[in-house]
Image (spheres, grey):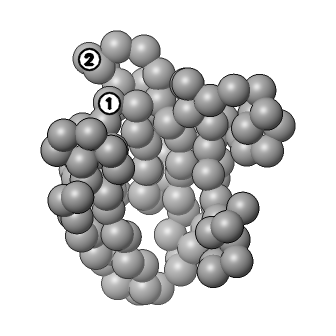
Amino acid sequence: MDLERLAPVRGVLGNMDGPDLARLVPEKLEFELEGSRIGLIHGWGPPWDLEQRVRKSFEQEPDILVYGHSHAWQEKWMGERLLLNPGSACGRGATIAILTLEKGARPIVEKIAL
């Protein structure tokens, strides 16, 4: 992938992705970065209860859970846990997120309107 020439890339399968991409990326991903447990998942189903569905997808809730599917921005702090939906990089009202992590510091979330 072109982005991998710049930095390591991690991604998950979306509900509209085809079998070619399914061979390359998982449906969900868990990893540690700068001392934080990160969970990455696209999401599925209707918009109501999406947050609960993605949270229940992980055996142990990660420190930072990044998800999508709804195409709607959400930055929700639950104590020290962060639930982040960066929105959608295309269409009306498009947004992306820049998440800055530093070991021992609270994550910084920046919302970018496109």
Going by the numbered disc 2, the residue's amino acid type is Trp
User: Element under label 2?
Assistant: loop
Q: How crowded is mark 1: few (under 14 residues within 10 Å), some or many (20 or more)?
A: many
Going by the numbered disc 1, the residue's amino acid type is Ser
Which residue does the image show at 79% across and 33% down from the upper left? Answer: 20
Determine the CA span between mark 1 and mark 2: 10 Å
> Which one is nearer the viewer's eye here, 3 or 43?
3
Q: Taking 5 as reference, is 10 above or below it?
A: above
- The number of numbered badges drawn on the structure is 2
The numbered disc on residue 70 is: 1
The numbered disc on residue 48 is: 2
Point out the frontmost of discs 1 and 2. 1
Which residue does the image show at 28% across and 75% down from the upper left? Answer: 108
Q: Percent position (x, y) of residue 99?
A: 37, 70
Q: Taking 94 as reference, is 56 above or below it?
A: above
Which residue does the image show at 18% across and 40% down from the upper left? Answer: 92
Location of the C terminus (image quadrant): bottom left
Q: Percent position (x, y) of residue 14?
A: 56, 33
Q: Percent position (x, y) of residue 39?
A: 53, 51
Taking the image as shown, residue 14 lies to the left or right of residue 87, namely right
Taking the image as shown, residue 113 lies to the left or right of residue 66, namely left
- Quarter residue 49 falls in: top left
Location of the N terminus (image quadrant): bottom right
